[in-house]
Image (cartoon, rainbow, N blue to C red):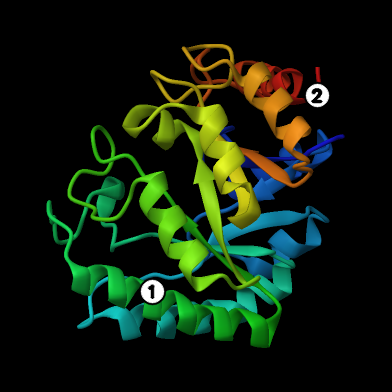
Amino acid sequence: MSFRLAVCAEMVYGELDLIERVRRIHGQGFEVELWDTRGRDISALAATGARFSSMSGYFGGSLIDPESADEVVASAEKLIPTALELGVERMVVHPAELGEGGRAVRPTYRSTGQMWLTGLRTLERLSVLGEKHGVTFALENLNTILDHPGIPLARAKDTLTLVSAVDHPHVKMMLDLYHAQIGEGNLIELVRAALPWTGEIQVADVPGRFEPGTGEINYRAVAAALREAGYSGVIGLEAGAAGGPGLAAADAALAAFRAAFEG
């Protein structure tokens, strides 16, 4: 059973402009993940012929804050035309609002029942929007130890609880195994438990957030577990190149990624 492999264009080939990055990723047979698409030439991106697996699905507000959850839904609706023009399948959202560098806009270190309920209701609203337009909203888990302190309900077990409670085909998990390894570990059991609600999987090794094979995660074992469980969806590389800047280092990182999941 083969996976669909994607590469995040925001984290490799930094020497090139975005369109050239997308062309290079597409030319190697990968799908493409994007982050914020505002201010970018969407027509030029579409003209590359690349298949876009995911993009950021909102640009304001907090999924779990009753005072700003409306902003999440409104901003998601404004991004729908971009998603449709690019043929994006998944629009990524987070448990709370992220600022510069992925930091929490309003750091919070304790979760409340109101947060859980607001998150559930906001995801239910996004499910309606997704069904209307034929896209899926994917809630990404984050680690709060290293990269995203102050984000409540960010662990994979929390995002899984929310998504499974919504139980709608247009709301899934963006299961990020880099974040899960830092915050929780036990990745093989995690992917098995989350599989029914997983829309896409993102990978990078730990430590460093580089390509598979550079750290402690046995991604070949993870790949075997995914095959055994019947997963045939997208696995996206959201990682930098361990070899540093330069096209050759990025090419090597993409080759290592492919080997981990196709080898």
Amino acid residing under circle 1: Leu
Residue 168's spot in the image, x, y percent? 60, 73
Q: Is residue 2 above or below residue 263?
A: below
Q: Which residue is mark 1?
A: 120
The reply to whether residue 60 is in sight is no
**Of discs 2 and 1, which sits in the foreground?**
1
* SS assignment at label 2: helix
* CA separation in Å, label 2 and label 1: 36 Å
The reply to whether residue 80 is in sight is yes
Q: Image point 20% across, 43% down: which residue?
A: 149
Q: Residues within 10 Å of mark 1 (few under 14, many from 20)?
A: many
Q: Image point 55% across, 79% down: which residue?
A: 127
* SS assignment at label 1: helix
Q: Which numbered disc, 2 or 1, marks the residue that appears first in the sequence?
A: 1
Q: Is residue 210 above or below residue 153?
A: above
Q: Is residue 160 left or right of residue 1?
A: left
Location of residue 62 by image quarter: bottom left
Residue 67's spot in the image, x, y percent? 20, 83
Q: Is residue 186 above or below residue 179?
A: above
Q: Which residue is mark 2?
A: 262
Q: Image point 44% across, 26% down: which residue?
A: 209
Q: Quadrant of the N terminus?
A: top right
Q: Is residue 41 above or below residue 28?
A: below
- Residue 165 is labelled as none
Q: Residues within 10 Å of mark 2 (few under 14, many from 20)?
A: some
* Residues at marks 2 and 1 touching, judged by CB atoms closer than 8 Å: no
Residue 221's spot in the image, x, y percent? 65, 18
Location of residue 188 by image quarter: top right
Amino acid residing under circle 2: Glu
Q: Is residue 37 left or right of residue 254?
A: left
